[in-house]
Structures are given as C-alpha cells and as structure tokens.
Image (tube, coloured by chain):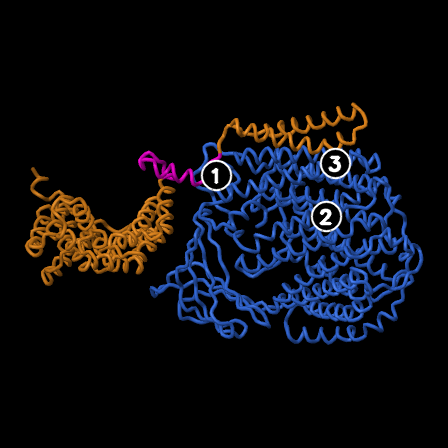
Amino acid sequence: MIAEAGRFLVALAFIASLAQMVLAWRGADHGGLEGWTRAGRAAAEAAVASAGLAFLLLIIAFVQSDFTIAYVAGHSHVDKPLVYKIAGAWGGHEGSMLLWCLLLAVFGLGLARVGPREPAMRSRAVSFQGLLQTLFFGFLAFASNPFDRLDPAPVQGNDLNPILQDPALVMHPPLLYVGYVGLSAAFAIAAAGLMQRSGGREVAAALRPWALGAWTSLTAGIALGAWWAYYELGWGGWWFWDPVENASFMPWLLGAALIHSAIATEKRGAFPGWTVFLALLAYVLSILGAFLVRSGVITSVHAFALDPERGVWILGMLGVSAVAGFALFATRAGSLGEGDGFAPTSREAFIGANNLLLAAAAGVVLLGTLYPLFVELLGMPMVSVGPPYFDATATPLMMAALALLPLAPFLPWANGGAKPALRQMRAALALVPVAAAGAALLWFGAPVMAVIAGALGAWVLAGAAMDAVSGIPAAKARGAKLAAAGRALAHAGVGFIALGAAADASRPPDINAAMAPGETIEIAGHRVTLREIARADGPNYLADRARVSVSGRGDLFPERRFYWGADQHTREVGLGSGIEGDVYLSIGEARPRADGSTAYEVRAAFHPLIWALGLGASLVVLGGLLALIGRLRAPVLEPRRKAGAVAPGKGAAPEPAEAGA
Amino acid sequence: MIVFAVVIALIGMVGALYIASPLAKGATGPFMRLAAFGIAALIALGALGAYLVGGSPGLEGRPYTEVERRLAEAEPETLTLPEQEERLRSIARRNPDDAQAQAMLGRFLSRTDRHLEGVAMMERSLRIEADPRVMSDLGQSLVALNEGQVTPEAERAFLAAASADPDLPEPAFFLGAAAYDAGDRETAAERWAGIVGRLEPGDPFGQAIASRAADLLSRPQGGPVSEDDAAPFADADPDDTDAMVDGMIGGLEARLQDDPDDLSGWMTLARVRAMTGEPDAARSALTQARSRFGADAGAEAIITALETALGTNEDSET
C-alpha cells in the first residue's frame, strides 16, 4: 500500500501545483488579497504536504527494502547500512526528482508565506512557482515515477552505486537541489515583477534573499561534491570540468553575479534589467543542468539516467520556462526602469564589471559544455572539450574578476572615486608582487597561471581582511554588521579557494608503484611504507585494507572494496593531512610477481595546501549565511524608503556595512 | 484493496477540500460556493486520474521481512537460484556466529561462479570455527578464482585441511596438483596414491582421482608442445622424427633401468609404448610399475586406471 499511496500523493501534488498556478494567478488579478490568493496558498500547502508525505513513504519503502518498487530494487540492498538506505531515496533519478519537486513546492510555499511584500506580486510569484511545480510534478508523475512497480519483484535489490555510499554524497544532492530549486524562487519573483510591471528595485529587493540563500546552498553542494570527488574517486582530482560539474558551475557563476547586481539594483537602481535577466537565466541554466544529467546526451561519471525520452520531457520544461521568462522580459523589461547613472570608479561600475566577467565565464563554460552536443547533432565527428579549453578561457576571466573583487567594497556608490580606495588598500596592493614572488619560488616549475592565481588569492585575502577591519565596525545596525562580516568572510573564502587551486596545480607528479608489504617509496619528502594488507569486510562489501606508514603522518588505511550487490569495485583513499598539504594514498589490485610474492598497485600523491579549498568553500558558505541573516534582520526596502534611508537617484554616501558587493 | 481505496479517497477529499475551502469561506453568493465545490471535485478527480495512469492498486507491497519469512518456510528445492541464495544469505545474516551457515553460503556462491564472495564467506566461517572441510572448500574456491592455479594461499588452505583431516580427498588431490604443476611428480604421485589408498575401494572420489592421476603422471615430461615450438620440425623427414621419438623412449627406458623407483616414469613409458602401437611393451612397463609399487593400494589403483585407459588390461583384450 505504501507504493500506491505514494503514487497517489505524487498525483495529488501535481494537481495541487496546477491548482496553485491557476488560483494564485486569479488571486493576483484580484490584487492578491481575496479568497483566490488564500486558495492558492492552500494549494501550495497541499502540494508540500503531499510531496513531503510521498517522500517519507519512499524512505520507508527503502528502509523496509520493498523491492516491488522498481526504484527501490534498482538502488538498494538489504545489507546496505540504514543511512545509505535512506540516502538511496535521492540517490537515483526518480527519487532525486521527487526531492527536486518537493523542494520546488517548499519554495512555492515559502513565496506564499514570506514572498514579496506587495500582495499581487507575491500571488503572481506563487503562481509562476506553481507553473514550474506543475511542469516538474507532471514529469515526475508520468515519466519518472519513483513508485513504479515490478511484478514479479526480485528477491534482492541491485544496491546503490557504491561510490554514492559516502557521507558527503548523502548531503551533496539535497544541498545542490536547494541551490538549483532556490533559484526558481528568484525566477518566479522576476517573472512576477515583469508581469506586474513592478519597478526594478522592488523586484531586486524581493529576490535578493532567495538568490542569496540558493547560491549559498549551491556553493555548499558543489564544495561537498568536489571534496567527495577528491577522496572517493581514487585519483585526487576535485574539479574535472566534467559537463555535469559545469552544469552546476554555470548557475553558480550567474548566481554570484545575481546576488551582487541585485545589491546595486536595490540600493542604487543600477542595472535593473540585467538583474532580472540574470534571475531568469540562472534558473533556466539549472534546468539545463538537469537535462544534461538526466537525458543521456552526455557521458559523465555523474550522469545517472540515460533516457532520451526523459530528455525530451526536460527539454520541454526548459523550453516552457525559458520562453515564458524571456518573452515576459522582452515585452516588459521597460517597466523595470533604466536605473541611475554612476561614475566609472563607483561601486556599481565595479560590480557591473565583475558581473560581466562572471557572466562571460558562464558563457564560455556553456559553449564548451554544449559544443560537443552541437557537433554531434550536425553529424560531424565527435569531439570532447576538456580542461585545456576551460583553463584557457574561463580561468582568465575568473582571474580578472578576482583582481577587481577586493576593490569594490572600498569604492563609494554613484559618484565614485578610486583614489581613497587605492590609498586604503596600499598594503594589500604591495602584497601582490611579494605573493607572486613567493608563489613562484615555492612552486618553482609550476604553471604561470598557478603563480598568478596564488598572488591573486593573496590579494583577495588581504582585501577581505582590510574590509573586515574597516567594514564591520563602520556598520551601525546588528544586521548590517552581520552582512559586512558575511561579505568579508565570503571574499576571504574566494581568496583561499584561489590559493588552494593554485597550490594544487603546482603539485609534484603522482607515483604509481607495485608494492609488496615491507617496501617503501617516497613522495614529497614523505617515506611511504606498505606494512600489511588485511581483510576489512563491511556489511555489503568485501575489502582489503592496507596499513601504510607515512613519515610525519602516521599510519594510513586505504582500502579496495568490492560491493557484491552492485558488482562493483571502489577505492577508499588514505589521507594524511598536514599544514603543508595532504599525502594521498590509494591501493588497487594485487598482482603476483615473478618471484612468487604479491605486489599491490599503490598510487601516492601529495596535494599542497589542499585544505585551503575546503576552508575557502566553508568561509564562502558561512559568509553567505551571515549575509542572509543580516539581510533578513535588515529593514526591508519599503519602510526604509518611507523613512528616507535610501534616496533613489541621488549620489549616496559609501555604505561599507551593506551585504555583498 | 478496499482499505487502500478508502485511504486515497480520504486523502484526495481532504486535500481538495483544504484547497477549495478559502473560496467557499469567502463566497459571497451561490456561484462562488458552486465554483469552490467544482474546484474541489476537479482536484480530487484529477488526482485520481493522474494516479490511475500507471497505478497498480491491486498490487500489494512486499517488505523484505515478508520475503525472508516466505523463503524460510519454503522447501529449498522449490526455490529459484536467486531465492536459494537469498535464503542462505538470510540464514547467515541471522546467525552471524554460525560457522556452517556462513560456509553453506560460501559454497553456494562458489558453485554459482561468485568465487570472490564465496572465499570471503568461507574465511568468515573459518574465523568462527576451523573446519577442515571448509578449509578444503576455501582452497578449491581460491583455485577457481585464480583460473585453476593452486596459489600459495590455496596451498596453505589445503595443507591446513589435510593436516586436520588426512582422509579428505580434495586437499590431497590439489596438493598433488600443486606439486605436479611445480614439476615434482614424485610428490604428486605420493599425494595421489596416498589418498586413493586411504579411501574405500570403489569410492567415486578415489576412482576420479586415480583416473586423473593416471592421465597426468603418464604424460611425457615437459607438457604439451606448443605450435610455435613444433614449427621447426614441421618440415622434418618422418623417418627422422620416428628416430627422434625412438631415441627419447630409449632414453626413458635406460633411465628407468638406472632408477626404477619412478612410478610416473613407468606410466609414461607404458603410455608412449601404447601410442606407438606396442601394447606388449606397454603391458611390460605396467608390470614393472606394479612390481615396484603394487603393494601400495593407491598406486595400484592408479596403475589399473592407466591400464584401463590404454586398453592394455586383459579385460579389454577379451
């Protein structure tokens, strides 16, 4: 009964979303205050309750190992640990799509409860969110239902892909989906603003917290995914420019641009059209990501549903969302206003420049990701676009953005004036050549780009530190202090990421060796001795665990596992972390030697300053959360306007304590 | 089915009424009330319609505990292979300290060519209890896992099994095979003759081992000749080849005159004599072997097996 009840709840959520779209639209037509609006909100609540209950039933089916449900049979096994049984609910296509839909409904309810202050705009946003929900719930109910049945049912399941049976991967998809789906709220508000012909400032003020929350979660999801790839895939990479990674990176880049341009729009009325366009585009690119992952058009370690029919569905949803959003934009962007003027050395100008660089980076990533598809579509020989392209195109653009990043918080709004800012930043500017020389010396023989990125990382860190020192005390309200701290932390995080990426690009070559117990190799000054190999089976896998002594790091225990349910081998690496970096070990197959002894494949690597990446990502997430809390504590636009705190169209004094920028 | 119908009808109606109720509450006239009712009906019927696309209301769910109970109660021979495996897994899972339960699952997995898992289960069993039969099965699974090679790990398992129970046929056979692969025919012959002699006459294992030992021990030293090795002789004069074969047989005979305590040597001589169309000479070689080793029941059984295979015994001539 669980399976069929779940299926019915998915159907009910689909119909409730449809009702939400229609009723809230009618409510917006009536000013957003009548029974229609309340009915639209009730529909949003019903959609959340139905989808939430369906998701709970799916988790129960996983816990009970009910293999009459095709999705459970395909992604679970009786011997799988409970936490991964639960995580299996979102470990495959259908279950993750249910989670996506549930989150869409939650954001729909969020908009209905704490969305834009203007009632008609809020109701319209709830209606647009209802449209997005209807598309995805329809896809779920009719083309990707997680409650499809098997008759006869197998006695045992196929198990969840072993590389997904990992703590980081339990949280990676939910965080990523909160990011992707959170951008739908920004999309819905932007579309509602266009529909209602609201001003750019109102739209920017309404969408800013949603975009900031979504982008923060997307950052956390991407960071967890990169961390997982680093230690789980067995060769130490954390970013591959894989099409699916790019699919998450493009909305991230545009989300970063959006949260900054929304500040300029809300505070100064600058680039209102651009802000709304970014809000629409970021979510459209999120759906493009879903298409790339789930349609089978690309080959990737992440692609987990290779079904062209589903691809057509998602392409249809992408088309409807894009056409609806951009048609509205094309016809009603004029209502957003043209914004106020600003000097080339103003904060708006630097935010605009950084926005262009981030958008251009997203553009070249999009081109590199889709180019092989177009080539294939035209019947030309297949090509693959890899790191050389992205390193030569996207990386320089992001470096340019890094160069500008620390300056913006020190620049005044509107009238500008770079001299005071440059004077304030003398110490940080002086650090750049020192950092470059240091990086060149430390990483002798490293790529030039790595040396430049290292110097830029130091520059951004210094800028963030100076911003924290001057910006936080200057802020008066508690919310503003939090927001200033959030900005400094997030920018420092970006600096650490640049530093970590640069250091890792300069790492010594990996060593692949066949080692028998008692033998020693050396990597980056560390002696690595294989001591013994012992059995270390788990509940649903067999494992050989090596004990490896690493000088300065103690004993490490890399494993080679065989998951019998999935019939798949995996490697669990041994990581010896230290301030100068990680010693990274993985073991592979055992092979007999001519002398009768047995040797094991061992891969040893050293990743300098790799911790800087994790620290950087954590700081960005923490900064995003502080900025969001600060934003929620700050007075909203309308009362502030009434109080005259913001004077549209006039040159305003520098406000270093404001969030972002 | 009825319970399910009632449940989804309740859920659907509650959901539909919840959504439509704000309209009904704010209704200023009969039209709005009717609209609210219509919307509620549309929502409930729409959800039912969307559910029925692909829904299977009559299909019961089946948590694993139910599957486990059914398999436990079933007669094993009525179950399919995956069901048998699951039954054994279930027993092993519920009795983690039962060595036999682990071993049974291990044997089943090995029989279905999942040797890696079979080995793991047998090792698990041996950690609980050192049973020589399980040690022997472990050794055999290791041999199967390594494509017929008696690896040092498998040899250790067989030695442990043979030491704990010398009457087990499989460890002795595989230990003999390991010695044979290493070129030590004497040890191989001792191992095989020893176990065949210890088994009851007529024991099928004994007969099988004797036949296999007779075949292996009577093969000419050096193993089969590859095509590449034979290529230089392809164009050789047949007379030269015959002379070469005669020379090799003569050499073997001379060696046996000097060192007659070589069971494998006599058996090889008998085999090549039979192959070159000299049954009397073959019989003579077997008689020599019998005179040297006939007192050993196992060796006698191996010689008899070769005799039968070559067709040189008296029964085959009548």
- Which three-letter amino acid code belongs to the residue tagged 1? Phe
Q: Of marks 1 and 2, which one's residue comes earlier in the chain?
A: 1
Residue picked out by circle 1: A67
- Which three-letter amino acid code belongs to the residue tagged 2? Leu
Residue A390 is a magenta residue? no
Question: In the shown orientation, is residue A650 left or right of residue A505?
Answer: right
Q: Using a 10 Å C-alpha cutoff, classify the residue at mark 1 as few (fewer than 14 neighbours), some (14 to 19) or many (20 or more).
A: many
Q: Which chain is orange?
A: B
Residue B81 is a magenta residue? yes
Q: Of marks 1 and 3, which one's residue comes earlier in the chain?
A: 3
Labelled pair 1, 3 in contact (Cβ < 8 Å): no
- Front residue of this view, candidates A440 and A15: A15
Inspect this view and state whether residue A319 appears. no
- Front residue of this view, candidates A391 and A176: A176
Q: Nearer the viewer, mark 1 or mark 3?
A: 3
Q: Chain of mark 3?
A: A
Q: Callout 1: helix, strand or loop?
A: loop
Where residue A490 appears, as percent x and y from the top left, is 72, 62
Cα distance in 3D space between marks 1 and 2: 35 Å
Q: Colour of chain A?
A: blue
Q: Chain of mark 2?
A: A
Highlighted range, magenta: B61-83
Q: Magenta part mainly helix, strand or loop?
A: helix
Q: Quadrant of residue A257?
A: bottom right
Image height check: is B215 above or below A310? Answer: below
Question: In the shown orientation, is residue A8 left or right of residue A18?
Answer: left
Q: Callout 2: helix, strand or loop?
A: helix
Where residue A156 appears, as percent x and y from the top left, is 44, 41
